[in-house]
Amino acid sequence: MYVDTFIIITEHTATNRRNNMLKRKMMDTLLKWKEEKGKECLLLKGARQVGKTFIIREFAKQNYKNLVELNFAAEPKFKHVFEGSLKMDEIIKEITLRDSSMIFIPGETLLFLDEIQECGNARTALKFIAEDGRFDCIASGSMLGIAYKDVRSIPVGYERQVEMFSLDFEEFLWAKGNGHKVVEYMKEFFDKKERIDGTINETLLQNLREYAVIGGMPAAVNKYLETHNFGLVHEVQENIISGYLDDIAKYAVTTEKPKARKCYLSIPDQLAKENKKFQYSVVEKDSNARKFENSLEWLKDAGLIKFCYNVSTPTFPLPAYNQTGYFKVYMTDIGLLNAMYGFRMKEEVYNNILKGRQKAAYTRT
């Protein structure tokens, strides 16, 4: 058993990598929505570049004869579609007036509204699209938590919200061609509370360290599978981080721009220290919550960070026992966090050579 499993874990052929589209758990979520939805659109939210657009296009390809895709950031002309009547027939008229190649086939068409945060009226229109019922509709966007003020009316009851993240460790293993057997193998030992064979365990740990370096951003994972070049992966990660900083500059209100940027860039230092909570003095010397707490909330609403609260009692429901002043802040992708520590950190993590206090502090994050 050990030998067979070891072969499964370590064999990653070039053919597997070429033929392996990144498999995402979100596909199952989309299929479930399609099967059980009533008059309800789907709103897929998440940070930029986690794979939202790709998975929706792939879902449409597998489940519909026709896809009508509007990207409000790439083609602002489509914003005007939603300035008048929001009845479905009027929407069809306005869309086809601007692009005659778009075809609406009742029951066989998915309407995909991408970057919907750029068009608040389109978010309002989800109610009327759902009520019409002839066409399935999925909207996606980032920064939705900070764009709600631009929406005339939130379509409560007519949209199902789902959040998408970068690839988790299991999806990363799938991308490498390991399949489900490795995960099932690990679960078997976990459920029995038994120790995995040392040789296999070290191979699994190496995969985990590899994931810590690369993370789960699809562009970074694909670059690694194509080239096995950590330098090129780092360039991809730096570009994503730069894009997030550009989003802060674009979307944050003027007074919050520099403060939100400082908070975001302080995360690696926050997690490298032995702090029991987020410390505003790390963001700026002698600073306090009054100055920066709104900036942190903005970053959370923008989908760029996650809060992890200390609880007074480890009892469910955990949020009921949150100690609101005691929290840590994490980035939404471990590979991006590693990239912010600098390229040298990749070697330290991948080869498991972090030393002393640095290793202890890092492993706790």
Image (cartoon, rainbow, N blue to C red):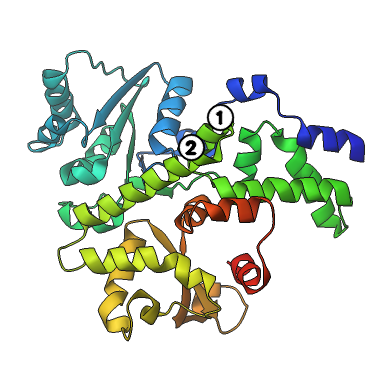
- State the image coordinates of residue 99 (x, y, percent, origin top left): 16, 18
Residue 155 drawn above or below residue 312: above
Contact, mark 2 vs mark 1 (Cβ under 8 Å): yes
The quarter of the rendered structure image containing the N terminus is: top right
Label 2 to label 1, Cα distance in Å? 8 Å
Q: Nearer the viewer, residue 12 or 128?
A: 12
Horizontal placement of 114 versus 153: left or right? right
- The picture places residue 75, in percent across and down from the top left corner, at 18, 30
181 and 291: which is toward the camera? 291
Q: Is residue 50 visible?
A: no
Residue 83 falls left or right of residue 250: left
The disc at residue 232 is 2
Between residues 154 and 181, which one lies in front from this camera angle? 181
Q: Quarter of the image containing the C terminus? A: bottom right
- Determine which residue is flagged by label 1: 227
Q: Which amino acid does label 1 sit on?
A: Thr
Q: What element carries label 1?
A: helix
Whether residue 99 is situated above or below residue 40 in the rendered picture: above
As drawn, which residue projects farthest toward the left?
84
**Residue 138: % across, % down:** 35, 36
Residue 299: quadrant of the picture:
bottom left
Q: What element carries label 2?
A: helix
Q: Which residue occupies 27% across, 73% down?
A: 294
